[in-house]
């Protein structure tokens, strides 16, 4: 009888183990960000007709305030770290489907910028997903790159204090970083091969050891909400 009781206990424990182990495994896959993940993201809604949007990561909403055109959100720490990364309308009467869905893996201690661009009117809503974690600039230098987020506008050249720094930057392109000495700069955006200045950003300050992203938005020749313009982000 004792041997039979031992066998029954053994079988019971085996059954419990079979049920508990998958439960534990599933808990490890719920996407909740561990304390040491420190994944940061910012969202910039650059679509003039999309209206405010929300960010979902692993199907969990990450923001409490909607992302509105054309204001950068600034960095915030993600509550979840598993894909997909999704952009949905803030207004359910506008759309209940995802405008954007990405499965790009997210890495611990990295920073990201999600540019939302294109036009809802012609179903061209799209994204530019930039990794903002870059190597530290050389001592006595800052770093800068360029992102073309202007739909329908072709490629651009960018000059820095009159010297061409980025050339033939097509739509959705993310350039490599370049290093420049700290100081005040005049950044100008021009159509590739043209001398026509589309956007001028004089007095832009680049600091020692900092990393920046210069970008453009809107449509060349557009007015009001779709007017072409440039902007700059401090990534570090």
Image: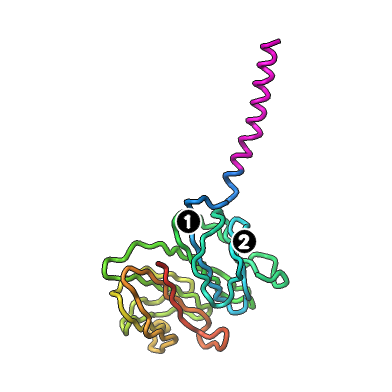
Q: How many marks?
A: 2
Q: In which quarter of the image is residue 162?
A: bottom left
* Residue plotted at (44% across, 58% down): 110
- Which label belongs to residue 61? 2
Query: Which residues are the magenta region?
Result: 1-26
Q: Quick check: 27 left or right of 38? A: right
Where is residue 90 drawn, in percent x and y?
A: 66, 70
Answer with left or right where residue 191 lies relative to residue 105: left
Within-10-Å neighbours for mark 1: few <14, some 14–19, many 20+? some
> Residue 140's spot in the image, x, y percent?
26, 70
Q: Which residue lies furthest to the top in this view?
A: 1
Q: Does the magenta stretch include residue 218?
A: no
Residue assigned mark 1: 38
Q: In what element is the residue under mark 1?
A: loop
Using the rendered view, name the quadrant where residue 22 is placed: top right
Q: Which residue is drawn at 36% across and 79% down?
A: 205
Q: In this view, does 196 lie above or below 236?
A: below
Residue shown at 36%/76% (left/top)?
166
């Amino acid at each position: 009888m004792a041997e039979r009781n031992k066998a029954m206990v053994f079988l019971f424990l085996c059954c419990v183990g079979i049920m508990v182990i998958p439960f534990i495994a599933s808990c490890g896959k719920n996407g909740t960000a561990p304390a040491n993940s420190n994944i940061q993201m910012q969202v910039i809604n650059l679509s003039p007709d999309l209206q405010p949007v929300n960010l979902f990561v692993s199907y969990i909403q990450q923001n409490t305030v909607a992302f509105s055109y054309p204001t950068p959100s600034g960095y915030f720490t993600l509550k979840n770290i598993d894909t997909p990364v999704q952009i949905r309308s803030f207004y359910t009467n506008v759309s209940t489907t995802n405008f954007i869905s990405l499965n790009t893996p997210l890495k611990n201690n990295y920073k990201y910028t999600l540019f939302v661009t294109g036009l809802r009117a012609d179903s061209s809503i799209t994204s530019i997903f930039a990794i903002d974690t870059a190597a530290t600039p050389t001592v006595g230098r800052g770093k800068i790159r360029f992102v073309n987020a202007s739909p329908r506008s072709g490629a651009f050249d960018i000059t820095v204090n009159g010297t061409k720094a980025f050339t033939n930057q097509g739509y959705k392109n993310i350039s490599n970083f370049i290093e420049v000495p700290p100081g005040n700069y005049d950044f100008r955006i021009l159509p590739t091969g043209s001398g026509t200045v589309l956007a001028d950003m004089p007095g832009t300050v680049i600091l020692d050891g900092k990393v920046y992203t210069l970008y453009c938005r809107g449509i060349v020749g557009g007015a009001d909400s779709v007017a072409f313009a440039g902007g700059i982000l401090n990534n570090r």
